[in-house]
Image: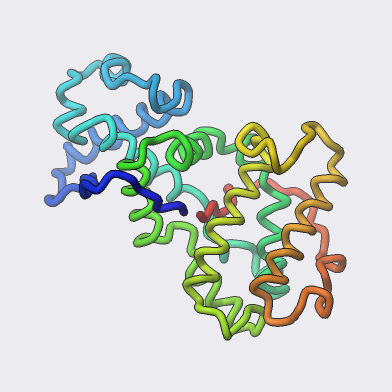
Amino acid sequence: MSGIASNPVTPPRYSRHHAPRPRSEAKRSRIIDAAMLHFAENGYNAARVGDIAAALGIAKGSIFQHFGSKDGLFFEVYKRAVRSFSKYLDAPADVRAAGFFEVLYYWLVRTEHLLREDWIPYRISLLGNYGTDLVLKREINRFLTTEDPYGTVAFVRFGIERGELRKDMDAEMIVSLLDWTFERFQDALLTAELDPGLFRRQGEMPEKKEARIRQFLALLQGAVGAAPAAATRGHREIRKIAPVELVARPKAL
């Protein structure tokens, strides 16, 4: 997560201080559902609160009453989207038993599932991570840090307890490194236009993608692994797992 900010003004906190009534909560949920599809189809900048209200048959002012602003509405949409993704440790028990880097491999080879089955929340996560202004991005970063929706902290603790990650490195640094690199690499696997300098050719054979996944894991293992990458499996022995239909992987961020 970047957290870079040029605006010295403290960003607004898009949160509610009072629990909504049941009917009000149901209406909020309906608005979020409609807004998620609208933002996913139109992008953040082109999305119009008036169009969302019209689709729901409610007044535009009603949306502002519940969420305060377009930013506030998108922030709630973003939170729902990322909360729908799996956490790292939601991998099957046999994969977890195989270790920290095996879990990472498990999720990476299932990256395309995001586009096949979960394109709406994935699109929302992309908009939040790359398509919003700094004020809203800082609020998103704060949410990701405080809530840890992908369970990155628990996952890193899992790796340390298994003796697979360095104990001479601050655990928070490992968490941040994983957030920064894993999500960016996964996004690049799916959407080359986000990072044209990383993968210079599109539409390459699956074997090429497999090789890149293994290279990425080897680099990560070399950086934070408890032993040098050359002294470990080097990911050549990582078990291949046949694709299955399941909920989307974690996105760290």
Residue 13 showing in the rendered view:
no
Q: Position of residue 174 (x, y in %)?
A: 55, 70
Left or right of residue 87, residue 132 in this image: left
Q: Position of residue 195 (x, y in %)?
A: 64, 39
Using the image, determine if residue 194 lies above or below residue 148: above
Residue at 23% in and 33% down: 27
Q: Position of residue 165 (x, y in %)?
A: 63, 78
Residue at 17% in and 47% down: 16
The mark tally for this picture is 0
Residue at 33% in and 45% down: 6
Residue 82 showing in the rendered view:
yes
Which image quadrant is residue 104 in?
bottom right
Using the image, determine if residue 193 lies above or below residue 188: above
Q: Nearer the viewer, residue 174 or 93?
A: 174
Q: Position of residue 142 (x, y in %)?
A: 34, 55
Which image quadrant is residue 241 in?
bottom right
Using the image, determine if residue 70 lies above or below residue 185: above
Q: Nearer the viewer, residue 77 or 241?
A: 77
Residue at 24% in and 46% down: 11
Judging from the image, the colouring scheme is rainbow
